Image (cartoon, helix red, strand yellow):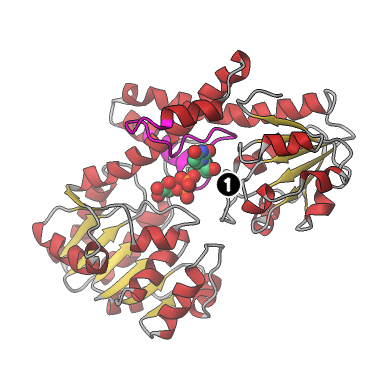
Amino acid sequence: MKLSVIGCGYLGATHAACMADLGHDVIGIDVDPAKVQLLNDGVVPFYEPGLDEVLTRALASGRLRFTTSWDEVADFADVHFLCVGTPQKAGSYAADLRYVDGAIADLAPRLVRPSLVIGKSTVPVGTADRLAAYLLEHAPAGAEVHLAWNPEFLREGFAVQDTVSPDRLVFGIAAAEDEQTMRAVYEPVLVKNTPLVISNRPTAELVKTAANSFLATKISFINAMAEICEVAGADVAVLAEAIGHDERIGSKFLRAGIGFGGGCLPKDIRAFQARVGELGVSDALTFLHDIDEINLRRRAHVVDLARTIVGGRFVGTKVAVLGAAFKPDSDDVRDSPALDIAASVFTQGADVIVHDPKAIENARARFPNLHYSEDLDAVVADADVVLHLTEWKQYRELDPARIGSLVRGKHIIDGRLALDPALWRAAGWNYTALGRPNA
Ligand code: UDX
């Protein structure tokens, strides 16, 4: 089938490459000519394990190309996937829909033959119906242009796997025949017995926001338990393990620590609150406000712990930060808890030096005043305290004895509960983990 993918960020670039790899003819469009050039050259503009190979393979097959031309897109494809970003609006909780609206405004006047637009971006419920009305009015093909919603659930770091083998597909449709078109697009995925849920468009939009809200709630729930464990002398890691054995609860997304960040969870729970306010049912989501607060409190708590460890003031101290990305296997620093903590410690007067295997460039663009290095030994050298904030595998493999010989103070705060306390303590470290007993 001839597909277009509109917006070539984490979602769109992955979707375009995977769809071409599955056998479709795909054209990707992005407003950024530099990004288009990189993708056409086979270079993934961000770090996503396994995507380079898929992109290279798809380009070599001749079934994939990228452009900045809307005319080319409208001319080539009959099915258009909308994959642009919906960031948080400045000064508001609401989602900024300017890229979604802009893309539809560019595409609509060029839709001169029957076509299907499939939204994948995360949008406030009701957006799809609004866009459908716009297309009906502005597309020359009028009622022969259909709109469906097909939320994505891809996790950064597992984007390829989540695209070609998702745990479910959701088709939000308004016309029965669109199901057949979508089934044809996803045929290679559906043959793997992937569960398929068919719904109307508002349900499909809500599935995504509900899923992310639930995940955020799970993380903040265990982080609230961590707050209690800290004052009660209990161990949140053991608590999570014990409750996770109950299949109704499940063990995933119950890892306590400095909480969730990234380009999705934080802004999605805020946009959801803004939207239900508009719909007049804000009481339904008052709990999400607490979920956000618990999450942000964990970041502040690490800063407080570190300040206490260095003697009550950061001025004149050196703080080594391990990790800048919002999670391992990603170079994404959007709303990264790790970087947020690093910046806060810096603002309070410490000399902060940050290590990350992949995210330094993005981190530096966001916080140019912090120091960065890819040389881990240089980062920890003479540090008064080490903060472990993104659980990259290489940090778990560190030798505490060797690192201990480089630092000034053998204090480590494990913000991700990913290091082995016994190992670090045996090497003479004062090891502190959120929600765990400190001895
Ligand atoms: C998320 C959703 O998982 C995905 O389905 C959706 O499509 C997009 O948003 P992503 O942003 O890639 O994906 O990250 P995710 O793996 O969900 O992690 C989000 C944050 O929660 C990270 O900062 C992570 O460190 C944190 N987290 C996750 C925890 O603090 N504890 C956990 O147990 C799990």
Q: Which residue is mark 1?
A: 326
**Quarter assignment of residue 280:** top left
Please count the marks in the image: 1
Q: Is residue 252 magenta?
A: yes
Q: Residue 303, percent across and down?
A: 71, 30
Magenta stretch encompasses residue 384: no
Residue at the image position 29 percent from the left and 79 percent from the top: 76
Q: Say what amino acid the circle numbered 1 marks.
A: Phe
Question: Which sits in the foreground, 189 or 238?
Answer: 238
Residue 363 picture location, percent across and down: 67, 52
Q: Main secondary structure of the magenta part?
A: loop
Where is the C terminus found, in terms of image quarters? top right
Identify the residue shown where x is 34% and y is 64%. 164
Asked if one can make out residue 17 in the rendered structure from this viewpoint, the answer is yes
Image quadrant in which the N terminus is located: bottom left
In the image, the segment drawn in magenta is: 244-272
Q: Is residue 381 above or below residue 311?
A: below
